[in-house]
Image (cartoon, rainbow, N blue to C red):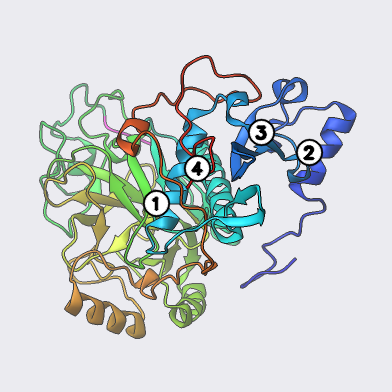
Amino acid sequence: MEGWRGAWYVPCLASLETLQELCRKENLTCKSIGITNRSLKSYEVEYLCDYKVEEGKGYYLVKWKGWPESSNTWEPRKHLNCPLLIQNFLRDRNEYLSRGREGKAMKVKNHVKTLKPAIADYIVKKAKQRIALQRWKEELNRKKNHKAMILVENTVDLEGPPLDFYYINEYKPAPGINVLNGITTGCECADCPAEKCCPKEAGFILAYNKRKKLKIQPGLPIYECNSYCRCGPDCPNRIVQKGTPYSLCIFRTNNGRGWGVKTLQKIKTNSFVMEYVGEVITSEEAERRGQLYDNQGNTYLFDLDYDSDEFTVDAARYGNVSHFVNHSCDPNLQVFNVFIDNLDLRLPRIALFSTRTIKAGEELTFDYQMKGHPQKSHPVPESIVQTLLELCQAQCRDHCPAECVPVPSHPLDEEPFLNIQSKPPMTQLQAVSSSPVTGHQREQDNWPPELGDGDGE
């Protein structure tokens, strides 16, 4: 085992391909590694690795789902019925082409032309990345406890899912920290809000209006009805506890800030968007981890300082979608402290509400130095603050100190590659149905050969 800050990584005892071969040998199914009853009895295209023109005919190198790469085979187009995978292959090839390189065919023999190793390698990496991100998306949606969807998107580089990040829906107390439920009674309201509803019992006003939008100023706490209250799930004072109501997308930014989060739906002003969750640690442990994060240029620490500085939330390894939200000096999200089933002032829940109308497709951001309490603010290491300010001088919005160092582009072979014009144009290709892929079946429709069946010149 090895890894920074502790023994977190466990080396694999066998590769994925080895496990797949063992399953096939014993006729066993294992969905998590792609071995199903269907793949045991038939061939299904997982992705396309390469392309060549041999004696005037075009062939794709096919990676078969559930089979090792050693079983890859060259197949003529007429054997394949996977328009979506061909579209992905062409898009990845054109993405490489758009980097400004001129492409030429590499002649292996007088009668054979194939893609250069660099472009073929890039296409394979993109295909593997696409599969990994799809599996990560499925994992996130399987673990979330709200109805809204979580999507994942990377059209920028070859980065895959984080290796050491675990999705959680609520605080995860570190060893030695007891987060006890301090609630034993609730309001008796039949129709909240009432004179003796939870916020008023705590000495504060109801945080939401009749449209279930926030109506209080930053710094004031939110007291929601709890599990002991008489009111039902449709109570207007049950908002944060229902979870994220909007479908969100974790996406790769195109200016070196790593991952970010954008909304897929319009969000109105003063709406609840998401909670900030993570591992609850002591302030002493936070100080120790903070020094490590400071050296790395990262910060995921959020002090629970509404009443005291005893605890901190660390979302570095454990968290939800909020882990990927970037910083901005002009944010569209605001932090609020929330109390529901735990009234311990040292352990408020952290909720993020919209400060304005946010359009669908717009990135979500909050100020990493935002005040959650009128007299206190979340401290960020000085070196990171300085970097943040320098970035904001260049472009104030949407810079995250956790990703302030530009991500280097993946080195790609400078050799030329086969530059074959697509027929028909990509505008027609994008209209192709993306039905489920089945491999080793002959096409019945008149699908045009995008890379041609000729010599490709």
Q: Mark 3 sits on what residue?
A: 75
In the displayed orientation, state which residue is furthest to the front: 110
Residue drawn at x 22%, y 26% as measured from the top left:
189
Residue 374 coordinates in the image, percent (x, y): 17, 67
Q: Is residue 436 magenta?
A: no
Considering only order in the chain, which callout, 4 or 1, is on the residue closer to the N terminus? 4
Which dot, 3 or 1, sits closer to the camera?
Answer: 3
Please give the range of residues in magenta. Answer: 183-187
- Residue type, numbered disc 4: Phe
**Residue hosting label 1:** 155
Counting residues from the N terminus, which is met first, the one under dot 4 or under dot 3?
3
Q: How busy is the neighbourhood of tag 4: few (under 14 within 10 Å), some, or many (20 plus)?
A: many
User: Mark 4 against mark 3, which lies toward the viewer?
Assistant: 3
Of the 4 image quadrants, the one containing the N terminus is: bottom right
Q: Earlier in the sequence, mark 2 or mark 4?
A: 2
Instruction: Classify residue 102 as left or right of residue 80.
Output: left
> Which residue is label 2 attached to?
20
The one nearer the camera, 257 or 295, is: 257
The quarter of the picture where residue 226 lies is top left
